[in-house]
Image (tube, grey):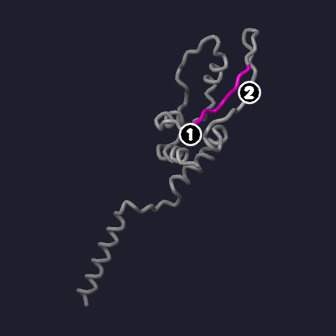
Amino acid sequence: MRVLVLSIFIFLNSFAEESLNSSDINNSFITKYEYGKMLYNNPRGIGCNNCHGDDARGKKLVEFKHTQNQEEYFCSLIAPDIKYIEYDVFSKKVNLKKNDNLKFGKEQVCDKLIYKANVMPTYFMVEEEIEAIYHYIQNMK
């Protein structure tokens, strides 16, 4: 009897170890896509969808008039399309605290104002969160 019980125990234990080692199992509460969707819509208060749109293709946020040296400029702030952006560019921009120091020509008044304003919020996300959002954007219908 002991041999039978011991044999059954060994058999079940080896089966349990085999199933735990299987890489096909997804034990997460939500999928990477669902997690990415949740973060895209509300990462840290201001969702990506508020500026980049529900489809991640970007949208016009605001138009404004700027006067400089008695000359009027009509500017538009447009959030870029992030649907087809490369991952390394996406990842860098998500946590960027300050834009690089670019030079602008005198005629690029609107471009300079918008770039210097750096309106993209800093979210302080970990790599797993950035990957999930990127996965969601790449796989959204």
Q: Are marks 2 and 1 in contact (CB under 8 Å)?
A: no
- Residue for point 64% across, 25% down: 117
Q: Badge 2: how crowded within 10 Å, few (<14), some, or many (20+)? A: few
Would you identify the image quadrant in which residue 79 lies? top right
- Rendered image: mark on residue 104: none
State the residue in front, 56 or 92. 56
| Magenta residue check for 78 | yes
| Element at label 1 | loop
Q: Main secondary structure of the magenta part?
A: strand
| Element at label 2 | strand
Q: Amino acid at mark 2?
A: Glu
Q: Amino acid at mark 1?
A: Lys
Query: Which span is picked out in magenta?
Result: 74-83
State the residue in front, 139 or 65. 139
108 is higher (above) or lower (below) than 2: above
Marks 2 and 1, Cα distance to the nearest angstrom?
A: 23 Å
- Rendered image: mark on residue 63: 2
Residue 37 x %, y %: 58, 50
State the residue in front, 133 or 127. 133
Instruction: Give the residue at mark 1.
Output: 83
Q: Earlier in the sequence, mark 2 or mark 1?
A: 2
Q: Badge 1: how crowded within 10 Å, few (<14), some, or many (20+)? A: some
Would you identify the image quadrant in which residue 108 lies? top right
- Residue for point 49% across, 43% down: 126
- Residue for point 66% across, 16% down: 109
Would you identify the image quadrant in which residue 63 lies? top right
The residue at the far left in this view is: 3
